[in-house]
Structures are given as C-alpha cells and as structure tokens.
C-alpha cells in the first residue's frame, strides 16, 4: 500500500471554494448523463475525480470548460461569486481555470518557449516579441516549480514526462496571466488523465509538480482511473457513477474496497487471489505469442485457441489496447514471437502484408482513419481484400463483384444495403458491419478486434456479437481488446487483465461478468511491487 | 489529398435511381455538365464573334490535335495524384524527352524509333529517382518533384545549348500530326486511347482500385496489406514515363525541340487534372469529362 503523501497546503482558512457546483445537470436528447451534481473544490487541495467510462466525469469537466451547456437549474459559483450559465467557450480562462487534456496540446515542431507562450502570443498587444526577456521569464517559471526544462529545446526532443510537465506548467502560467484583471482567486487546474502513458519516475515528477501548485494555493482537479494514484496524490476524491455524484470522500480515510464499490456500484464477493491453471495447452492453440514487448507492453505471453474468443482489458494505458496492432505488425514490437501452425514468426519483423498472408485480420478501433476510406464506396471498401478474385483477362468483373457485394451486405444486414454509396454515409454500426464483412470475406484464421462496438448502437451491437460468435464457431481464433466490460462479458471465453504492460489476471468461465472484470481492473492496484514497464521510453503520445 | 471531399453523400446511385429530391437532381445535373456547358458557351461566343474563321472544321481539327500533348500529360499526372502524391516534374520530363529527340535525332541523326525508346527509358529512370527520394528518404513529393523539374529544365537548356533545334525526322511528325484519321490528326487519337486506357485501368483493374485506396487512406491501405511504398513508387515511374511520351508527341507536333516552351504546360496540366478529378469523384463518365476538361 502506498504511503499517503502529505499532499497540498492546508486550504486557506475562510476562503470560499474555488468552484461550487450546485445541481449541475446535463441531458442529451432527453437522457440525463449528468444528474444534479453538487461539488466543491477548495483552494489548495488536490481533488480526485473518479468513475468509469460514461459515468459523467468528463461531461462535468466539459461543462466547466464551456463545451457543454448545462441544463436549466444548474448553478455554478467561482470564488464565491455566482457565474452566469452557460459559460461561453473559453470563458474559463477569465475565471482562472486551466485545462490539461490527455493529448497535452503541444506543438512538437516548436520550442518549449514557443509552446509556453502560444496562448499569450495570441492575446499580446506588443508588436515585437522580446525573446531574451521571454526566455528569462520562462527559466524563472521553471525554477519556481523546480522543473528542469530548457526553453530553447524542441518539444519533439522531449520525452513524455517532460512534455507533460511543460503542459502543466503552461496551464499554471496561463491560469495566472490570462485571468481577467477584475477577477481574483487562487485559480484551478484541471488535469484530465495526464499520467496514463507515463513511466513511474514521470509520475513522481508530475505529482511533485502538482503538490507545488496546490501549495501555492490553487486547486487541482485530477481526473484519473487509477486508484493508486488518486490515493497517493489527492486530499479528497469525488466518485461519479451513472451520471450522479456518489460521494466525496477524504482520500486518506477510505479503503480501497470502499472506493471500488463506489465506482462500480456493487459489493463484490471476496475472491482470494486465486489464479486458475494456465490457458489452452500450447499444443492445440491456433496462435502462441511469447515474450511480446514494446515501449508500453512488457513481456506478454499467451496462447489463443482455435474457436476461442479471448478478451483483453485493463485501465487506460495498461497496454492491452496495443496487443492486436503489435500482432498484426501495425506498430513495431521490440521483442516477441508468434507461433502459428509450424511457423514461428518474429514480431519485430512483422508487417500487415505478412500478417494477412498468415490469414490474420485486424479490425481497428478507429474505423474512419484505419479501417476504411470514407469517401470510397461501400462496395470497394468491403471487397478490397478479395478484389483479386474478380480479375479476369479483361479486367475486373464488375457485375460479379457487385452481385457478391450485394449478397455480403444482405448477409451482414448492412443498412442501407446499397453497394454504391460512400462508406462515410453509413451509421457507425453499419460501418463496423462492413468492416467485419471486408475481413471475414478473406476467411481469416485469426481475427484481432479492438473496441469492436465503439460508437455502435445497441441493435447493431448484438449483431456484431453474433458475427464474432459465428466466426469463432467456424474455427477462427478471436482476440478482442476492449475497455467495454459488458461486451467482454458477452463474447469472451477468457479475459486477460493487463496492468502496467503485463498480464496481471486471467478470468475464465463463470468469473467473466461485467462487474467482476471492472472490479479486477480497479483492484489490480495492490502494487507493493510497482516497477513500471520499461522505464523512460514513453513517447508521450 | 486535394480531391473533393463531399460533405453530402450525393452519389451516382442517387442520380441514377432518381432517389433524391427534384432540386438536388437539377443541381447535380448542372454540376455534371458544367464543363460541357462552358464549352458550348465558348463555342457560341467565338462562333458569333468570328463565324467565318472559328466555325470551321479546320479550327476543330486544330483544337483537337493541338491539345493531345496536354491530354497525355494530364493522364501522366493523374496517376500519382490518385495515389496521393504530387508530381511537379511532369513538364520537366516532357521537355527532356522532347530535347532528347532534338539532340539525338535532329542533330546526331540517330534513328527516330530508337530515340523514342530511349526517351521512354529516360522517363522511367527519372520517375524511379523521384520515387527513390520520396519513399526511401521520406521527402515530401512536392519538394522532390519540384527539384527534379528544375534540374531537368536546366539540363534541357544545357543539352540544346539554349537554342531551338529543328529538323526532327518526318517519320515522327507524320505519325503525330500530319497523318489523319477521320480528318483529325493522329495525336488526338493517341490522347483518346491513353485516356481510355487510364480510365480502364482505374476503373476495371484491381491495381487501379488499390491506387485509389493508397491515395485516399494511407493507413487503411497499409493495414489492408497493400504495399503502399511499392504502389506509390510505381505511380511516379508511370507518371514520368507517360510524361516522356507526351514530350515525344510534343516534338512530333512542333517538328522541333525548343528549350523553354514546355514549362508552360505545368499549370494547365494541374488545372486539367484537378478539373478532371473533381468531376471524376462525382461522375462515372470520367473519360469524357476529363477530355473536355483538358480542352
């Protein structure tokens, strides 16, 4: 158990909360995704925000950022003053709030100094920029927060930790300088999961920076999935579930079990860390992966049986989401082998051409950019993998192609079943069906899925599950990397749970329920032995 | 790349089946035939201003024959454009092959057919070098081909000693501009055949469809197992080879090789290619539209 740190300075006696939210709600098309949230964030505190995907925490933050207009009846006070709602976009700056999102928003081709001042340049009234003075100011700012950054370095040359530090210092700087002159107050920094891709040492640096900031009197709102981090760094934490605020707790006085129950909502049967015997015997497995590693995955080995649906999950940044791409050769692996049949393939030397030659198929999460070309017709997208079958001595047999495509669209129940329309005019679910049709048409033996039902409506979801089941029944080995626990519970025979780049747990049979998977993901964190994966090499993206 | 990205999913299918609302059909038809309409307007204006000289068969024959070079050069450019790469060296390649004919045939007296083969080989080599820099060194094709084009135009000045070389073998001029089929110079028919061939390649071969995928979605193509590098490279080689052929036609049309006029082809070629691909992304009758676009 991590030692609770002496975080933050004591809140300034008598000062009003930096942010008081009262009855903040938000509905989309009549569905309440945020339901009368009352939340106070005090000056000088580090306040954790916890909850599953879709629990409402990001909606809440987007209301603060002025990205979403809250429903009528919501009220917000900042530094004790009522604030008119909805906040215009960008107005958060005038109230002394500053956001750091996971992608950090840095321009990598520019220098540290230029990135630091990007927000102020746009508001500056000076004609010329006094670079010497700017550099000196930047150095003193970095000194103030004990951050070791060279203002003249190019951001592209920084590692992930340095980039995160820069983004946070920039946010603090903007919080101070861009605040409207009439407003007072300590300001609030909102950090939206800035640590997920950082190595352990990077987290330490980030946490000490956060403490410096809170020590200066500002409030820090820290969004995270990671219980350990929240316990280590925050003074108080607020837990969202299903759009409601469930509790705000003193972090030090609450147990892990209580936190997990608050996040996933049910008490779970105690499970002694029993581990079942290891998965399908390597002999009858369709695919055996050994010692797979890259910058975020550390020496993963597993076997995947014929006709098996193997799930992979974990918290964001735990590395599970990279596995399908590494197996397919979409990203280069550092080490690892893949054995299929009698052949042993080196994963660092893998590429999609080779993967397809070994009858592997990858259905990426980003359909629009990696799966299919939106501006090209459904027909061409669906038939791309097997187009050579239609080549005759006088070119493509377009009528045959059209007939087979029509038949495929009908079989996969793509709506509308018109081969000639542009792929991008289909809905998410239908796009996904076309993508499945495209790859299953090539009759793969190994099907790699990443978030296969992301952005897919309920009806299509069930159909996609059915397609995956059918593929497995016909002997295809399926690997599904997903953060949707319900989906994993619906389709998987086994689920591997990742933590810091390693397989930490394996669930089988009756253990595979949505709640159990969620519980395992969140409680993996008894990290008495932390040792993050391959230190240092995070590229920060 | 620069291809039109239709925000509204108006498609051939909608038009063909008359599924869309009336207004959309009318607008779509207007867009579809806009180039043809523009052509008719041009003919009407010049026809009424100069009916005696403009509205004659020789004018028509002249227009059709003289634009063949541009048509072929546009076809050359369309191949890498479809694969998502610019080729700004097409005009330079055209000038190079034209000047090779001038120097080797008119000055050195080498057999014209042998010179033509050499020109095509030279074109392929230039395309290969373009691909080398673009794909192995990862330099933006815009920059690489701009550089190649500049080097080539310098090379052309040096080769021809900055002068126009006349006296190209009549064998070539006969087969390009003098001989006629249906009253129109052969050059026009060459342009037509090459355009039709390109259209067939893009529409009716698996390789053509792959080229389109590579141009529209590099990541998708890579993850679909297409050999993206190889395809882009081949497109640049094909482009330069075809540009070389355009240079041969140019030499045959003028009967001489001059060291500068070829540069003037670059922008009209891009204009024609973009007009063509704007239309091509919407309509199935690419051939006619491109042809009239080049005109």
Image: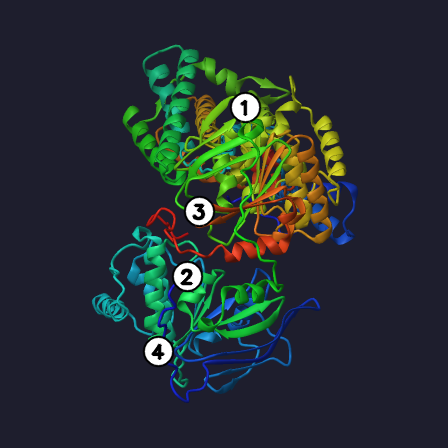
Neighbour class for label 4 at 10 Å: few (<14), some, many (≥20)? some
Q: Is residue B283 visible?
A: no
Q: Is residue A184 visible?
A: yes
Nearest to viewer (mark 2 / mark 4): 2
Dot 3 and dot 1 within a common chain: yes
Q: Earlier in the sequence, mark 3 or mark 1?
A: 1
Q: Earlier in the sequence, mark 1 or mark 2?
A: 2
Dot 4 and dot 3 within a common chain: yes
Q: Which residue is mark 1?
A: A341
Q: Which residue is mark 4?
A: A9
Neighbour class for label 3 at 10 Å: few (<14), some, many (≥20)? many
Instruction: Identify the element where label 1 is drawn.
Output: loop
Left of B118 or right of it: where is A257? Answer: right
Instruction: Give me the chain letter of mark 3.
Output: A
Q: Residue A490's x, y, as percent?
A: 67, 47
Task: Give the alpha-carbon distance from disc 3 to disc 1, as whole Å.
Answer: 27 Å
- The residue at the point 54 percent across, 23 percent down is A341
Neighbour class for label 1 at 10 Å: few (<14), some, many (≥20)? few
Are circles 2 and 3 on residues that touch, CB within 8 Å?
no
Are circles 1 and 2 on residues that touch, CB within 8 Å?
no
Q: Earlier in the sequence, mark 4 or mark 3?
A: 4
Q: Which residue is mark 3?
A: A501
Task: Give the alpha-carbon distance from disc 1 to disc 2, as whole Å.
Answer: 44 Å
Q: Earlier in the sequence, mark 2 or mark 4?
A: 2
Q: Earlier in the sequence, mark 4 or mark 1?
A: 4
Q: Which residue is mark 2?
A: A1
Instruction: Identify the element where label 4 is drawn.
Output: loop
Left of A318 or right of it: where is A537? Answer: left
Specify the farthest residue to the bottom. A14
């Amino acid at each position: 158990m991590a030692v609770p740190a002496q975080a933050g300075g004591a809140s300034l006696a008598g000062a009003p909360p930096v942010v008081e939210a009262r009855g903040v709600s938000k509905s989309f098309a009549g569905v309440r995704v945020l339901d009368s949230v009352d939340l106070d964030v005090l000056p000088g505190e580090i306040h954790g925000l916890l909850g599953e995907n879709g629990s409402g925490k990001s909606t809440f933050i987007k209301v603060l950022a002025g990205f979403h207009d809250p429903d009528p009846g919501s009220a917000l006070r900042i530094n004790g003053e009522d604030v008119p709602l909805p906040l215009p976009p960008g107005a958060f700056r005038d109230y002394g709030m500053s956001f750091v999102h996971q992608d950090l928003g840095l321009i990598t081709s520019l220098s540290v100094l230029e990135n630091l001042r990007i927000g102020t340049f746009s508001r500056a009234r000076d004609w010329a920029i006094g670079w010497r003075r700017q550099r000196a100011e930047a150095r003193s700012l970095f000194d103030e927060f004990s951050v070791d950054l060279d203002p003249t370095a190019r951001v592209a040359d920084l590692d992930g930790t340095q980039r995160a530090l820069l983004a946070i210092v920039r946010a603090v700087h903007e919080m101070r300088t861009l605040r409207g002159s009439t407003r007072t107050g300590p300001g609030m920094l909102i950090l939206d999961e800035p640590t997920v891709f950082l190595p352990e040492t990077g987290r330490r640096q980030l946490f000490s920076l956060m403490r410096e900031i809170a020590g200066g009197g500002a409030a820090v709102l820290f969004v995270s999935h990671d219980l350990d981090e929240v316990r280590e760094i925050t003074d108080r934490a607020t837990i969202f579930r299903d759009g409601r605020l469930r509790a705000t707790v003193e972090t030090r006085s609450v147990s892990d079990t209580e936190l997990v129950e608050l996040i996933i909502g049910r008490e779970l049967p105690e499970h002694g860390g029993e581990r079942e015997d290891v998965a399908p015997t390597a002999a009858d497995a369709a695919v055996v992966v050994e010692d797979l590693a890259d910058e975020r995955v550390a020496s993963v080995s597993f076997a995947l049986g014929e006709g098996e649906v193997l799930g992979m999950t974990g918290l964001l940044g735990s590395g599970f989401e990279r596995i399908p791409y590494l197996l397919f050769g979409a990203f280069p692996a550092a080490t690892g082998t893949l054995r299929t049949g009698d052949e042993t393939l080196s994963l660092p030397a893998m590429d999609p051409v080779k993967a397809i030659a070994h009858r592997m198929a990858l259905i990426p999460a980003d359909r629009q950019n990696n799966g299919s070309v939106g501006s090209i017709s459904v027909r061409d997208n669906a038939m791309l993998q097997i187009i050579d079958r239609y080549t005759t001595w006088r070119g493509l047999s377009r009528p045959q192609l059209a007939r087979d495509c029509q038949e495929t669209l009908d079989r996969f129940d793509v709506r509308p079943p018109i081969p000639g329309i542009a792929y991008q005019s289909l809905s998410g679910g239908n796009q996904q069906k076309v993508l499945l049709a495209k790859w299953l048409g090539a009759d793969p033996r190994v099907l790699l899925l990443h978030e296969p039902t992301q952005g897919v409506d309920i009806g299509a979801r069930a159909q996609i599950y059915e397609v995956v089941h059918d593929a497995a029944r016909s002997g295809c080995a399926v690997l599904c990397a997903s953060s949707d626990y319900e989906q994993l519970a619906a389709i998987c025979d086994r689920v591997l749970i990742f933590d810091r780049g390693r397989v930490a747990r394996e669930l089988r049979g009756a253990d595979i329920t949505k709640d159990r998977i969620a519980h395992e993901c969140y409680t993996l964190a008894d990290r008495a032995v932390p040792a993050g994966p391959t230190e240092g090499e995070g590229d920060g993206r | 790349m620069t291809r039109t990205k239709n925000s509204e999913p108006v498609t051939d299918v909608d038009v063909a089946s008359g599924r869309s609302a009336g207004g959309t059909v009318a607008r779509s038809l207007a867009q579809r035939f806009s180039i043809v309409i523009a052509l008719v307007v041009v003919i009407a204006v010049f026809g009424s201003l100069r009916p005696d000289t403009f509205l004659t068969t020789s004018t028509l024959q002249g227009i059709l024959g003289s634009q063949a070079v541009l048509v072929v050069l546009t076809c050359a450019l369309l191949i890498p454009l479809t694969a998502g790469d610019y080729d700004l060296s097409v005009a330079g390649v055209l000038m190079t092959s034209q000047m090779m004919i001038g120097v080797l045939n008119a000055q050195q007296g080498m057999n014209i057919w042998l010179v033509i083969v050499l020109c095509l080989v030279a074109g392929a080599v230039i395309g290969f070098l373009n691909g080398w820099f673009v794909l192995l060194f990862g330099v933006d094709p815009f920059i690489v081909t701009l550089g190649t084009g500049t080097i080539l135009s310098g090379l052309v000045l040096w080769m021809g000693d900055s002068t126009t070389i006349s006296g190209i073998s009549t064998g070539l001029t006969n087969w390009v501009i003098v001989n006629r089929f249906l009253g129109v110079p052969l050059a026009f028919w060459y342009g037509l055949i090459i355009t039709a061939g390109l259209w067939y390649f893009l529409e009716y071969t698996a390789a053509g469809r792959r080229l389109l995928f590579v141009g529209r979605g590099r990541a998708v193509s890579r993850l679909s197992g297409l050999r993206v590098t190889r395809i882009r490279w081949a497109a640049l080689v094909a482009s330069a080879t075809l540009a070389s052929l355009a240079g041969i036609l140019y030499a045959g049309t003028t009967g001489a090789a001059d060291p500068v006029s070829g540069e003037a082809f670059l922008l009209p070629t891009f204009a024609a290619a973009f007009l063509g691909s704007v239309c091509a992304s919407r309509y199935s009758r690419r051939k006619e539209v491109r042809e009239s676009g080049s005109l």
